[in-house]
Image (cartoon, rainbow, N blue to C red):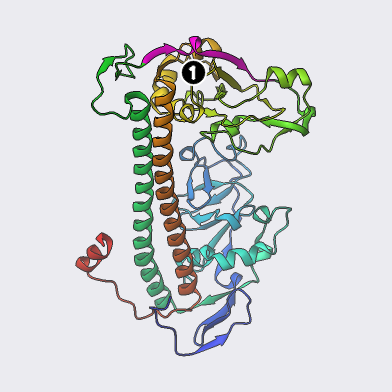
Amino acid sequence: MAKYQTYAEYKDSGVEWLGNVPQHWALVPCRAVVDHIVEKNSNNALDNYLSLMANIGVIKYEDKGDVGNKKPDDLSKCKIVRKGQLVINSMNYAIGSYGMSPYDGICSPVYIVLQAKKDVFLERFALRIFENTPFQKYLATFGNGILEHRAAINWEDIKNKYVPLPTLDEQKNILDFLDHETTKIDHLIEKQQQLIELLKEKRQAVISHAVTKGLDPNVLMKDSGVEWLGNVPEHWDVRQLRYLGSCQNGINIGAEYFGSGSPFISYGDVYRNTALPKNFEGLVQSTENDKKIYSVIRGDVLFTRTSETIEEIGFSSTCLRDVKHATFAGFLIRFRPNENIFYPEYSQFLFRNQLLRAFFVKEMNLVTRASLSQELLKKLPVVLPSYEEQKNIAEFLTKKDGNFEQLIINANKTINLLKERRTALISAAVTGKIDVHNWQAPTLAEADTELSA
């Protein structure tokens, strides 16, 4: 914040989260600037049910997708929300579950609804105050709950807590300044997010090309006979998986067996990882016979077998080292290649490449739940270079994949730094740590220059 000026005089607010504030600013309890609104939908007059999404704000229930709490059958107990009112999830405020409603509607009775007293507190300035991370953390200390981010707060916790109160003109200047600066930051974050998506797409394209076309750009090609594979190197085989190894569904056991014992490989271990992790959180009491039937050794490839949607089945994870005494979940299928058929480090790229999605999506019949059968997995056509060529491709892709991963890590670091700057800027402005009361918006030409920089 070094580039911004500070006010000429400050005073001690006497409030821990605020520290010093400008001398001419007032300090008032929340009840002096916002009203607690408890307007029940007792006659079911409204049915526009609204939800709060962390770090997004207030949205229509139908726009949030199949996540979070469900819409209640009885809407008479819901609270009425008016456009411009501040809505806070009493359970999740500390993780960013708050926002100003852009709609008239109704919300969960556990939400806190506040109305800014417009003669002293601009609605959007109220939002900026409650958006302020130090204030969120401060209020969270008064909540009740085992988990810090689930510590429920209520109006009684809020109403007597002090907040800064600049004049209305100064509030407007602060809002204009923050709108301008946060828009620039949001633009930079969006560019980094777009970069990450492009890097992921490029990484997948490089992998798909290497495992279906090889590394030699001058190699003679032939028609694979498989639509989604297209042409492949002339000296490569194209064979169904059934001829290259065996399949085994995972073990189905009750919850009473979990908690201690031997490593247990879960659906999430496979879905989230191209190669199986070194350590597994799941532990299970399994018999010696189970460990033999459902063993996991170097070279095995585990596939996700069942899910709610087609898009989540057929994801693979390759075992790059023996997992002693392990068993694996019933929602998985293990493919164990014949000896010296697949180089494991090559398998992790081959079976995770995006072109296989075309096969699974086309072949899968979705009834109430997507399920990948052994028979369908065995029909999967794969290209088979020599073992030595697989090693070369794996070495090439490991290096490329590492480069892409580092670029993605760097982009995510940039995003986190930008978000931290955004948070710090909001906090500094609304608590008077920087003086922006004389700030003027740049001309359109200057603004365009800033955004394109």
Q: Where does the C terminus fall, quadrant-wise? A: bottom left
Where is residue 100 drawn, in percent x and y? 48, 57
**Along the line of sight, the residue nearer the viewer: 95 or 404:** 404
The mark tally for this picture is 1
Q: Residue at x 58, y 79 (%)?
A: 19
Amino acid found under the numbered disc labelled 1: Ile
Q: Is residue 144 magenta?
A: no
Against 291, is 184 above or below? below
**Along the line of sight, the residue nearer the viewer: 52 or 228:** 228
* Highlighted range, magenta: 237-251
**Along the line of sight, the residue nearer the viewer: 397 or 191:** 397
Residue 5 located left or right of residue 68:
left
Residue 239 located left or right of residue 313:
left
Q: Which residue lies furthest to the front in this view?
A: 388
Where is residue 80 drawn, in percent x and y? 55, 50
Residue indicated by mark 1 = 341
